[in-house]
Amino acid sequence: MKPVAWTIVACIISWFAAALVVDWRMSFEILCGMAGPLAAVSITWLLAIRFERRHPAALMSLMMAAFAVKVVFFGVYVAVMLRALSLRPAPFVASFTVYFIGLYLTEAFYLRRLFSEGMRASR
């Protein structure tokens, strides 16, 4: 749970810092670009922790299923943000890309740590 909390806090702080130097509209577009990747990474991490503790053998299947769900989710998410909310593509896509890459690198780091701790515990 701690990694999710730290990730959320870091994202909020980074968004707040950006909001201090841009106008309200761009601040909202940055927030929207952050929200989707943050939600996906947080949910995936919470599920991974739960499965790793209860059903470690099923974790890879979970991650593959989560990948498929995220492909659809992100396609729908980006379409809704750009069409329904009429966000400007440049700020939204830039924010989405930066948070997506940063958050997935963070998730990879946490998963590597989770797996290495699990391997040490099983020895």
Image (cartoon, helix red, strand yellow):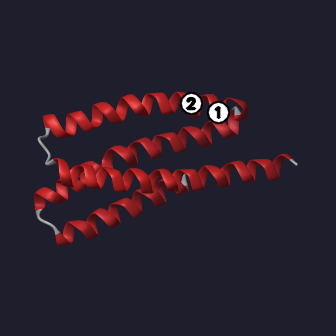
Instruction: Sort mark 1 into few (<14), some (14-19) or many (20+) by Cα contacts within 10 Å.
Output: few
What is the x, y in percent for residue 13?
Answer: 34, 66
Report the side of 109 relative to 102 (left or right): right
Q: Is residue 102 left or right of residue 76?
A: right
- Along the viewing direction, whichever of 17 and 82 lies nearer the viewer: 82
Q: Which residue is mark 1?
A: 60
**Who is closer to the viewer here, 25 or 68?**
68
Q: Residue furthest right?
A: 123
Question: Secondary structure under badge 1?
Answer: helix
Residue drawn at point x = 71 percent, y = 35 percent: 56
Give residue 64's mark.
Answer: 2
The quarter of the picture where residue 80 lies is top left
Answer yes or no: do the residues labelled 2 and 1 have beta carbons within 8 Å? yes
* Residue type at numbered disc 1: Met
Give me the residue at 47% from left, 40% from top.
43
Along the horizontal axis of the image, is 54 left or right of 38? Answer: right
Establish if 27 lies above or below 57. below
Separation of marks 2 and 1 at Cα, in angstroms: 6 Å
Check the image and report above or below for 1 versus 15. above
Residue 67 placement (x, y as % from top left): 49, 33
Q: Hey, which quadrant is residue 52 in on the image?
A: top right
